[in-house]
Image (cartoon, grey):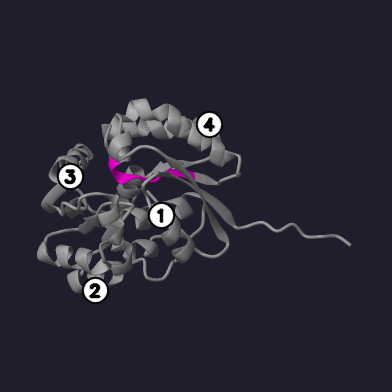
Amino acid sequence: MIYEPIRPRARIGFIIPSSNRMVEEQAWRLLPRDIIPHVTRLAMTNRHKVPLDQLLPRIEQATALLADSDCDVTVLQCTGTSMSGGVAMEAEVLAAMEKISGRPALSAASSLVSAFTTLNAKKMVFISETRQDEHAQKLKFLDEAGYTILADRAVGLSGSAEYCSAPPQLWFDEAIKLRRDDADVYFISCANIRSIDVIEDLEEELGRPVVTSNQAAFWCALRKIGITDRLPKLGRLFDEKTAA
């Protein structure tokens, strides 16, 4: 008897903070069943936080570990971390990851930029989970990347336990409060929150695309490896078949 090998359509590797509790759950729940997520955790947030250039050797090691699982694409999935060194440092991190894996590499930041570019979005409403100092760091990255922030808010949650336990309705309400009819896109930042569950409701209410950190990473990872599925409940971004 000849046995046919069992292989998934693709494997996506995620490097996430040790404190993150949302990426795995959302990936398993929302990605197609034949797209397999693999996760490696790194100490990179809260008491473990260091400058991105100092974190790079650990990111390279995590990338090598995920490469052992034959991942088709590897994603550094922490918005604040990937934005923290600015545009040039983020590009340096991706280049290092790709050199090690020999496959495409993304970050939360690069996935978001790809999403905004694909949606032709330059003017945005920006909401983050964090306190003002870390919010300001993300604003700095967005400004450097060329975006106009029409309205923004740091929600000011105290840490990971509050991030991942905050209900989706919080993010819906915060976006509605900042409604701007001249916005191209609404961006809700953080890979450790439940904003992904209100994307379509917000798009219907606001009449604009809504982009979140995990949604953008899922979309960009799939598009980078040629998978064009439109996933339900993940909004207008998934109407786009290619990533910029």
State the CA–CA distance, disc 2 to disc 4. Answer: 42 Å
Relative vertical location of residue 96 with respect to residue 128 in this rendering, above or below: above
State the CA–CA distance, disc 3 to disc 4. Answer: 31 Å
* Callout 2 crowding tier (Cα within 10 Å): few <14, some 14–19, many ≥20: few
Relative vertical location of residue 34 with respect to residue 60 in this rendering, above or below: below
Residue 48's x, y, as percent? Answer: 33, 35
Residue identified by numbered label 1 = 23
User: Please, what is the three-letter code of the amino acid marked with disc 1?
Assistant: Val
Residue identified by numbered label 4 = 100
Residue identified by numbered label 3 = 135
User: Please, what is the three-letter code of the amino acid marked with disc 3?
Assistant: His
Determine the residue positioned at 30% across, 70% down. 200
User: Would you say residue 77 sits in the magenta stretch?
Assistant: yes
Determine the residue positioned at 21% across, 59% down. 186
Q: Which residues are magenta?
A: 74-80
Marks 2 and 4, the one that precedes in the sequence: 4
Residue 203's x, y, as percent? Answer: 24, 69
Q: Closer to the camera: disc 2 or disc 3? A: 3
State the CA–CA distance, disc 1 to disc 4. Answer: 23 Å
Marks 1 and 3, the one that precedes in the sequence: 1
Quarter that holds the N terminus: bottom right
Q: Closer to the camera: disc 2 or disc 1? A: 1
- State which quadrant residue 188 falls in: bottom left
Determine the residue positioned at 37% across, 48% down. 244
Residue identified by numbered label 2 = 204
